[in-house]
Amino acid sequence: MESLRLEIITADRVVVSDEADMVEAKGTLGEFGILPGHIQFLSTVEIGEVRYTKGGATRHLATTGGFAEVFEDKVTLLVDAAEFAEEIDVDRAKRALDRAETALKELSEEDDEYRKHELALQRAVTRISAASKRI
Ligand code: ATP
């Protein structure tokens, strides 16, 4: 059966370099799924969960925002950070969530710092959710 080549790359490391039967991620315009034979595609990706299946098993990751490219059955995600569900330190993510929630309570949406804490909150929530799907 045809498969995809999946690469998830950050500035620090190659997080995934694997074969996949299907890849799902969160684009700016919503969730998208990639199967072998997909047309060439370029999208921004949002902070969210990425899933891929390989031989019937599903792996879950949390990623920050970045870019996704599909070209000739190769799916490349270039993101600031990505972790497999099994790698996520849940206590650390909970602390990040607490910090972000505390900061957001003190700020209004007009404050310059608001967006920064909102993104930190999204990263933490995504990590906690992805970690619950560890295998
Ligand atoms: P923190 O405040 O806990 O550092 P953050 O959202 O600011 O969280 P990032 O800037 O997104 O962290 O990531 C910095 C680095 O730390 C990346 O390499 C990322 O993969 C890693 N990382 C962040 N949070 C966790 C976590 N809860 N478990 C494992 N790795 C994490």
Image (tube, helix red, strand yellow):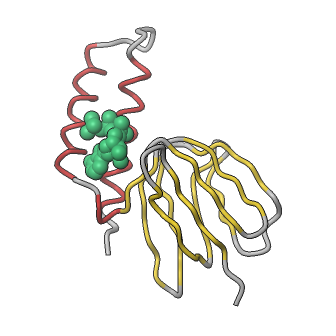
Q: Position of residue 100 (x, y in %)?
A: 28, 29
The quadrant in which the N terminus is found is: bottom right
Whether residue 121 is visible, yes or no, is: no
Q: Is residue 87 above or below residue 19?
A: above
Residue at screen point 57% across, 42% down: 66
Q: Choose top left, top right, bottom left or bottom right for residue 44.
A: top right
Q: Closer to the camera, 6 or 38?
A: 6
Whether residue 63 is visible, yes or no, is: yes
Residue at screen point 57% across, 48% down: 78
Q: Position of residue 34 (x, y in %)?
A: 68, 66
Residue furthest bottom in the image: 1
Residue at screen point 63% across, 45% down: 67
Q: Closer to the camera, 93 or 6?
A: 6
Q: Is residue 22 above or below residue 84?
A: below
Q: Position of residue 33 (x, y in %)?
A: 65, 64
Q: Within the displayed image, which quadrant is ligand 1 positioned in?
A: top left
The quadrant in which the C terminus is found is: bottom left
Q: Is residue 44 above or below residue 21?
A: above
Residue at screen point 48% across, 64% down: 16
